[in-house]
Image (spheres, rainbow, N blue to C red):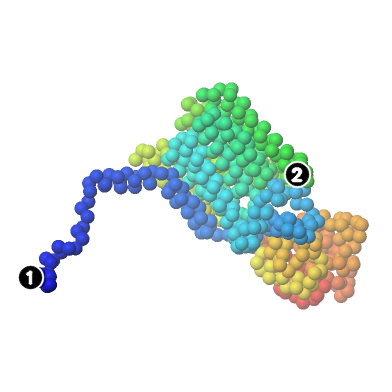
């Protein structure tokens, strides 16, 4: 007879046993881990995270600079027109340094999603992609370690940090140029530059984003020739010429057939530029050396190790490193130099990465490579913060301006350098309310007489000046003329502007009302 009672099983008999490690699988796991950390992508992710962190920890103003305000505001206007809204009564293509329907529209879309910070973070994305392009270019030239170290050196430059939080054309143009350079070198090594047309399209995009991107065309073509000359000789020269031809053909096809109105802006801002902020060659050289001198010095040292074996490549990289600041030194223009010195870092950091890789491969010099990167980071954080705060923060002025505009709703305004305020107050004003101190037409006349007649006719509801243009002092004389008791416009606010804690001037506000919004000195 079978017993229905089961005897207890010895302790642990029916429990799952711990798996016995298989010695054969351990090398596989170690190999996978080794491949992961020797891959470029984890390190690129770390560098990108570092760029995001730097963009947050480096102090900046929360309000827009006038260029940011201008581009985002016009981007909204272009979108409104495309969606059937009010047509543009001014054409920004006549004075923009890039196509108004390209970057400004992208920035306006980002602004709709998350405000000014989102528009600035769009530039951060462009700069991260530029860093990846810089890494790809350097890896194709000098190896993976050089590529990663060069990308890290690029990411921590103060001018690059600045562009990553600056809602302007520059980061987008630089991104396309970096991708074009990477593709040109990669295609040359792989298939003899059969992808030249695509490289030309990328360079066109760089120029369309910002016309100064044209400086990249000869450098990218020169890189392809330098890399492919030994193997392809004159064949690579002709294919490099095809890059330039594609760029020119696409550009003129787009501009002459679709956007003839861009030509005045191209001429005014680039090909026949009138110097806005003149400076001596010595001053511009000093500023360039101060802002990117360590990177250029390291590039020169790195070039010294390569010049005997690859003289043409080294020459092209060094010329590309300094071409943008040299152009500004040539014309004596200080405006935007702090941005443009970053344009050549795509090429300089290839040589910097090669030098740091040479140091890192020698255990006794690896700490020196690490110390150099730390030093470059501290330098970059210092100047990146300076650049991002190099204009008066206008939040206090915004609060006053909102009050006086609310007291004079819908009235025309006479303003000075108002691009930031047009953007910030677009929720309570219309584009046609804004008039500036650059060009003004009224009652069939222009210039000072137009301002005189408009003021005598009480045309403006709000007037504010900050004394940065030629007409501002004459307008103040018009506002101050006559018996003080009988004046129509009254000084109601005097808002100080500060840069890095130092007062640099005032915004003065006049309205028909007499109520004061700030103390008047």
Q: Is residue 458 left or right of residue 32?
A: right
Tell me what residue is drawn at x 22 percent, y 55 percent.
Answer: 19
Image quarter for residue 285? Answer: top right
Please tell me how many numbered marks the rendered image carries.
Answer: 2
User: Disc number at residue 1?
Assistant: 1
Query: Residue 423: image x %, image y %?
Result: 70, 61
Decide which of tag 2 and tag 1 comes sooner along the chain.
1
Tell me what residue is drawn at x 86 percent, y 72 percent.
Answer: 488
Q: Which residue in the rendered view is the most extreme toward the front?
A: 1
Between residue 388 and residue 135, name the one nearer to us.
Answer: 135
Discs 2/1, front: 1
Between residue 51 and residue 78, name the one nearer to us.
Answer: 78
Q: Distance between the residues labelled 2 and 1?
A: 100 Å
Tell me what residue is drawn at x 73 percent, y 58 percent.
Answer: 83
Between residue 42 and residue 370, name the one nearer to us.
Answer: 42
Query: Residue 95: image x %, image y %?
Result: 75, 49
Tell me what residue is drawn at x 63 percent, y 33 percent.
Answer: 243
Is residue 412 visible to us here?
Answer: yes
Is residue 284 visible to us here?
Answer: no
In this figure, which residue is indicated by the disc labeled 2?
258
Quadrant housing the N terminus: bottom left
Image quarter for residue 476? Answer: bottom right
């Amino acid at each position: 007879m079978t017993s229905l009672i089961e005897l207890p099983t010895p302790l642990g008999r029916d429990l799952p046993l711990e798996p016995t490690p298989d010695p054969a699988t351990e090398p596989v796991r170690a190999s996978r881990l080794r491949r992961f950390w020797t891959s470029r992508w984890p390190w690129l992710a770390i560098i990108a995270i570092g760029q995001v962190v730097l963009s947050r920890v480096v102090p900046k103003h929360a309000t827009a600079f006038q260029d940011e305000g201008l581009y985002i505001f016009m981007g909204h206007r272009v979108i409104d027109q495309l969606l059937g809204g009010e047509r543009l009564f001014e054409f920004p293509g006549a004075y923009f340094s890039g196509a108004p329907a390209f970057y400004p529209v992208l920035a306006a879309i980002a602004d709709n999603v998350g405000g000014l910070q989102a528009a600035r973070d769009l530039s951060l994305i462009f700069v991260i992609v530029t860093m990846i392009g810089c890494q790809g270019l350097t890896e194709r030239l000098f190896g993976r370690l050089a590529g990663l170290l060069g990308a890290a050196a690029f990411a921590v430059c103060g001018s690059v940090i600045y562009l990553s939080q600056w809602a302007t054309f520059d980061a987008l143009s630089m991104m396309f140029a970096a991708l074009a350079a990477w593709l040109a070198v990669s295609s040359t090594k792989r298939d003899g530059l059969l992808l030249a047309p695509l490289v030309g399209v990328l360079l066109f995009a760089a120029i369309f984003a910002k016309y100064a991107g044209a400086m990249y065309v000869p450098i990218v073509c020169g890189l392809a020739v330098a890399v492919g000359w030994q193997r392809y000789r004159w064949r690579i020269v002709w294919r490099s010429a095809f890059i330039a031809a594609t760029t020119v053909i696409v550009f003129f096809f787009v501009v002459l057939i679709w956007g003839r109105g861009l030509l005045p802006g191209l001429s005014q801002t680039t090909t026949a530029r009138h110097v806005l902020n003149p400076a001596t060659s010595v001053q511009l050289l000093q500023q360039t050396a101060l802002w990117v001198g360590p990177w250029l010095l390291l590039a020169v040292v790195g070039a010294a190790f390569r010049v005997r074996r690859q003289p043409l490549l080294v020459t092209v990289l060094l010329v590309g490193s300094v071409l943008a600041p040299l152009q500004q030194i040539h014309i004596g223009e200080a405006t935007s130099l702090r941005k443009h010195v970053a344009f050549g870092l795509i090429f300089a950091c290839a040589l910097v990465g090669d030098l740091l890789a040479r140091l890192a491969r020698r255990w006794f010099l690896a700490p020196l490579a690490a110390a150099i990167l730390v030093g470059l980071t501290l330098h970059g954080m210092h100047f990146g913060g300076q650049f991002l705060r190099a204009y008066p923060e206008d939040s206090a002025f915004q609060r006053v301006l909102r009050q006086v505009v609310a007291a004079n709703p819908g009235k025309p305004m006479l303003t000075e350098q108002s691009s930031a305020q047009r953007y910030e107050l677009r929720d309570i004003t219309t584009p046609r309310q804004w008039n500036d101190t650059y060009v003004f037409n009224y009652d069939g006349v222009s210039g000072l007489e137009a301002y005189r007649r408009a003021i005598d006719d009480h045309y403006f509801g709000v007037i504010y000046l900050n004394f940065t243009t030629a007409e501002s002092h004459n307008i103040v004389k018009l506002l101050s003329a006559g018996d003080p008791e009988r004046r129509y416009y009254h000084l109601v606010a005097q808002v100080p502007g500060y840069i890095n804690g130092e007062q640099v001037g005032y915004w003065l506000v006049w309205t028909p009302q007499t109520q004061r919004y700030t103390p008047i000195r």
